[in-house]
């Protein structure tokens, strides 16, 4: 064994100090690495991650034997009669009259129309009795500004449904409609739209507060360079986007009230149990954590498989028609099964941390067995949050409070209208004209 000569001059105390320093550096690097290697890191952020190869032929599309569907033929809105040729294009021989016609129906998008400049002559009158000056308005004429409701709705759809930055919106308006505006004008139009939608946004808060259950999730977002959080509250028919500088239970109290009577389906963030005991913890998060440990330590593979088997067994049965007594015993049996599994694995050194985490939230894992109307995972909130996550990748951050209010108001109404099977454009125009 060859030793560095410089190392030989170190005293024992110096070597201990060096080992302690290196150990601290390793621990610090491990903490930083957790941002890229943990159970909940998406594949796009994992260092060195590559999409696994597709087994089989690797061809995309429907499987073999799948019956295809044909797009239904539309009824033509316009008929174009093509004039027949008088002479053959090959030998210039005179052609006779057509013996028939080949019918082809195509679906075409009309050319974008230029902006219309409409002048409204609004009559001004004075009451002879009280002297009140009255100006008669028109339903298509906004009270403020020089842009109509269609223009406002189109800009909002491009921004919050089409995910276009402000500069791209100005380019699209100029290209398609010969309308020249600045990004600041686009922002102002969205300000007016959000202000008009604010009463409906407040109604969504009421719907969420009175719901029997709600799926909740949150993610980080920069606002004017500071750390904020985007909260998602979603039910079967309503989605609410909330942006706040806090990730604590005060946001839950603000939106749901201090005495929310429903059930919250959520992940393991500590703000939820600090707010209420009526929780359903997400099994998708739990199984991902168990799989992550099993991939690192082969001795944890049986634990992951047993936990996964327990979950699938419960999911297959919990939506069946059962009496309250049957549901209670079903729930009690599931709790006992999980406790036995945790007891068997608690002595394994590698499983002590996940076992302790599962045991701390044990009373929240099986709420769905007693309430079959809810789900055992928080995937619905994660799906609702995904639209904001995608837009965050595009715009990076929000610059001020106006942009924050615009985003949470318009995004909430768009998501809710889609949930309810409504056309966002039509609903937005109705709201602007009201």
Image (tube, rainbow, N blue to C red):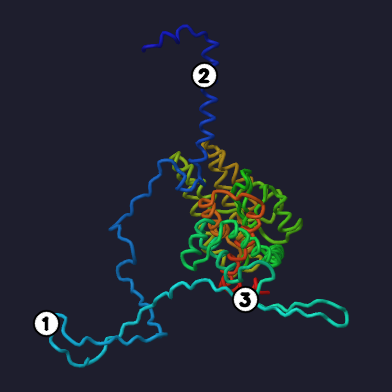
Where 411 falls versus 39 (above or below)?
below
Q: Nearer the viewer, residue 405 or 337?
A: 405
Question: Which quadrant is the C terminus positioned in?
Answer: bottom right
For label 3, the residue is: 119
Cα gap from disc 1 to disc 2, whole angstroms: 94 Å
Q: Residue at x 57, y 73 (%)?
A: 117
> Could you say which is closer to the camera, residue 351 or residue 4?
4
Please state the horizontal and vertical placement of residue 215, each as a whole percent of the image: 62, 59
Q: Residues within 10 Å of mark 1 (few under 14, many from 20)?
A: few
The residue under the point 41% across, 8% down is 5
SS for dot 2: helix
Circles 2 and 3: CB atoms closer than 8 Å: no
State which quadrant residue 157 falls in. Answer: bottom right
Going 38% across and 81% down the picture, which residue do you hit?
Answer: 72
For mark 2, does the 10 Å Cα neighbourhood hold few (<14), some (14 to 19), or many (20 or more) residues?
few
Residue 153 placement, left or right of 124: left
Query: Which residue reaches farthest left?
Result: 91
Residue wearing tag 1: 91
Q: Mark 1 or mark 2: which is in front?
A: 1
Query: In the picture shown, does residue 386 fall above or below 7?
Result: below
- Distance, label 1 to label 3, CA atoms, is 60 Å
Which residue is disc 2 drawn over?
Answer: 19
């Amino acid at each position: 064994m060859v030793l560095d000569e410089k190392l030989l001059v170190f005293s024992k105390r110096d070597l201990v100090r060096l080992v302690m320093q290196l150990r601290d550096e390793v621990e610090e690097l491990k903490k930083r690495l957790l941002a890229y290697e943990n159970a909940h890191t998406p594949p796009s952020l994992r260092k060195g991650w590559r999409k696994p190869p597709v087994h089989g032929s690797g061809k995309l599309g429907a499987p073999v034997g799948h019956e295809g569907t044909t797009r239904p033929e539309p009824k033509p809105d316009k008929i174009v009669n093509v004039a027949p040729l008088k002479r053959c294009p090959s030998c210039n021989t005179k052609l006779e009259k057509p013996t028939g016609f080949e019918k082809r129906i195509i679906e075409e998008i009309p050319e974008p129309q230029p902006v219309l400049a409409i002048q409204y002559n609004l009559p001004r009158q004075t009451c002879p009795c009280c002297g009140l000056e009255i100006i008669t308005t028109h339903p298509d004429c906004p009270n403020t500004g020089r842009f109509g409701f269609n223009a406002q709705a189109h800009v909002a759809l491009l921004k919050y449904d089409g995910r276009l930055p402000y500069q791209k919106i100005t380019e699209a308006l100029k290209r398609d409609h010969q309308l020249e505006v600045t990004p600041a004008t686009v922002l102002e139009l969205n300000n007016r739209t959000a202000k008009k939608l604010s009463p409906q946004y407040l109604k969504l808060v009421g719907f969420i507060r009175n719901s029997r259950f709600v799926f909740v999730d949150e993610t980080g977002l920069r606002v004017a360079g500071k750390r904020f959080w985007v909260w998602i509250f979603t039910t079967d028919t309503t989605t609410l986007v909330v942006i706040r500088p806090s990730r604590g239970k005060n946001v839950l109290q603000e939106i749901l009230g201090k005495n929310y009577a429903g059930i919250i389906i959520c992940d393991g963030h500590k703000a939820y149990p600090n707010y209420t005991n009526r929780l359903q913890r997400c099994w998708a998060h739990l199984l991902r954590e168990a799989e992550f440990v099993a991939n690192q330590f082969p001795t944890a593979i049986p634990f992951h498989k047993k936990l996964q088997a327990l979950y699938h067994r419960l999911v297959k049965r919990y939506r069946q028609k059962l009496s309250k007594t049957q549901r209670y015993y079903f729930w009690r049996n599931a709790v006992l099964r999980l406790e036995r599994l945790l007891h068997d694995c608690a002595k394994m050194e590698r499983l002590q941390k996940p076992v302790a985490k599962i045991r701390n939230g044990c009373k929240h894992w099986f709420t769905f067995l007693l309430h079959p109307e809810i789900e055992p995972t928080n995937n619905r909130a994660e799906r609702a949050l995904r639209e904001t996550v995608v837009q965050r990748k595009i715009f990076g951050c929000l610059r001020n409070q106006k942009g924050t209010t615009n985003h949470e108001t318009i995004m909430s109404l768009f998501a809710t209208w889609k949930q309810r099977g409504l056309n966002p454009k039509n609903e937005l125009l109705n709201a602007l004209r009201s």
